[in-house]
Amino acid sequence: MKDLQTAFLDIPKEEGNKINLHLNKEKLLKYLIMFVVVTVATLVIPTCGVLRSQAVIVGILAATTFAVIDMVYPHNVYINEFHAN
């Protein structure tokens, strides 16, 4: 059972302490922009006062939701063909 704990990792077992972390910088930038836009909009748009911490939480929630949808929703690209579903 111990061997199954690292079954989903892309890191080879024998590399020791060296960890290879591959980040998609384009997607990370999209999520960061989404976080900033929603946080600033939450602070600026309402006429009643909103606490800064609450605006940050709303921004984190929006960026996380956007990230999950972006990762889960399939991307279909059709080249030179028409597909009707």
Image (tube, helix red, strand yellow):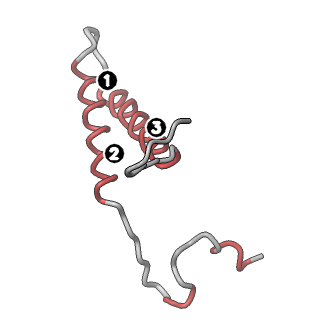
Callout 2 amino acid: Tyr
Query: Which mark is first along the chain, 3 or 2?
Result: 2
52 vs 19, left or right, is: left
Query: Which mark is first along the chain, 1 or 3?
Result: 1
Callout 1 amino acid: Leu
- Answer with the quarter of the image where residue 14 lies: bottom right
Q: Tags 2 and 1 in contact by the CB under 8 Å rule?
A: no
Q: Secondary structure at mark 3?
A: helix
Query: Which mark is first along the chain, 1 or 2?
Result: 2
| Image quadrant in which the N terminus is located | bottom right
CA gap between label 2 and label 3 equals 10 Å
Residue to which mark 2 is pinned: 31
Residue to which mark 1 is pinned: 51
Q: How many marks?
A: 3
Identify the residue at horizontal 29%, vertical 55% (top origin): 26
> Where is residue 11 drawn, in percent x and y?
51, 79
Q: Secondary structure at mark 1?
A: loop
Q: In the rendered image of this protein, does residue 22 appear above or below residue 82?
A: below
> Where is residue 68 drawn, in percent x and y?
49, 44
Identify the residue at horizontal 61%, vertical 69% (top origin): 8
Q: In the rendered image of this protein, does residue 66 appear above or below residue 15?
A: above
Label 3 CA crowd tier, 10 Å (few <14, some 14–19, many 20+): few
In the foreground, 41 or 85: 85
Callout 3 amino acid: Thr
Identify the residue at horizontal 36%, vertical 64% (top origin): 23
- Answer with the quarter of the image where residue 49 lies: top left
Q: Which mark is residue 65?
A: 3
Q: In the rendered image of this protein, does residue 58 appear above or below residue 16?
A: above
Q: Tags 2 and 3 in contact by the CB under 8 Å rule?
A: no
Q: Secondary structure at mark 2?
A: helix
> Where is residue 19 drawn, in percent x and y?
43, 78
From the viewer's perspective, is the residue at label 2 or at label 1 nearer?
2
